[in-house]
Amino acid sequence: MPHLVRIWDLPTRLFHWLLALCVIGLIATAQLGHMEWHFRLGYAVLTLLIFRLLWGLFGGRWSRFAAFLYAPASPVAVFAREGDPLHAVGHTPTGALSVFGLLFFLLAQVGTGLFSDDEIAASGPLARLASGDLVSLVSWYHREVGKRVLIVLVILHILAILYYLWRKRQNLVRAMLTGDKELAQAVPASRDDARSRLLAAVLLLLSAGATALLLWLAAP
């Protein structure tokens, strides 16, 4: 008998979709030259990333980093169809690599954006604190490397979702909308009640405060 289990708590789902919208907005505003909104979205992404790092420690069962930290050989085992069935409950080993990769490169992109300067009209809030050579280097990475890496990772993420839907008949998008997965075996559910959501709200406020503090300290 299949089991309907709450895997993705509401804070994780909101983080996922808000981050997706912000990344799309960042790409669009960069291409259109709306740099004021580009920076605002960058600060929003920084807040979301800080929240996700905290939620990876205090969030629901399957959203915690401990739930998808796998041994290096795990992706090989999955491709060989020898992975642990529990690997398919939350993030699979390959899915975990995707998550950590996106988090790492998003942090790198936001971090370099804070120090970037296009030498025309847009300058990151921390650019004045770094040397000219460092600003030039991180600006080059932000425009020429980081942006392309993230676009590739997003495309791979979408292709993986389509692969799971087409080949494995697993609708990952629906699970990230409803939070529930239909599983063959009973597994512990993620906590997703008023208390955990209140904790998420507090952590989000702390994350926004950290971003605001950074910008305040960087102000002339």
Image (cartoon, grey):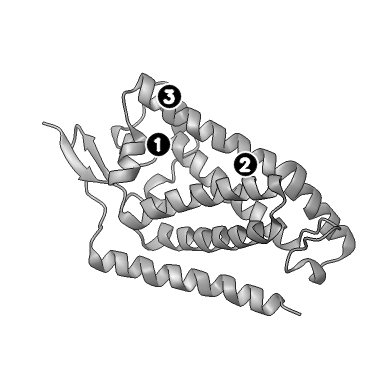
Snapshot quadrant of residue 148: top right
Answer yes or no: is residue 73 visible. no
Q: Amino acid at mark 3?
A: Tyr
Q: Residues within 10 Å of mark 1 (few under 14, many from 20)?
A: many
- Identify the residue under disc 3: 163
- Identify the residue under disc 1: 92
Q: Amino acid at mark 2?
A: Leu
Vertical side of 173 occupied by 66: above or below: below
Image point (49%, 44%), residue name: 99
Residue 197: give x, y in percent of width and height.
30, 64
> Judging from the image, what secondary structure is the residue with disc 2 in?
helix
Task: Work out whether residue 49 or residue 219 is closer to the camera in this orientation and state it.
Answer: 219
Residue 184: give x, y in percent of width and height.
19, 32
Q: Give me the C-alpha separation between circle 1 and circle 2.
A: 20 Å
Q: Is residue 85 left or right of residue 49?
A: left
Residue extending farthest to the left is 1
Mark sitting on residue 164: none
- Identify the residue under disc 2: 150
Vertical side of 17 occupied by 191: above or below: below
Answer yes or no: is residue 70 visible. yes
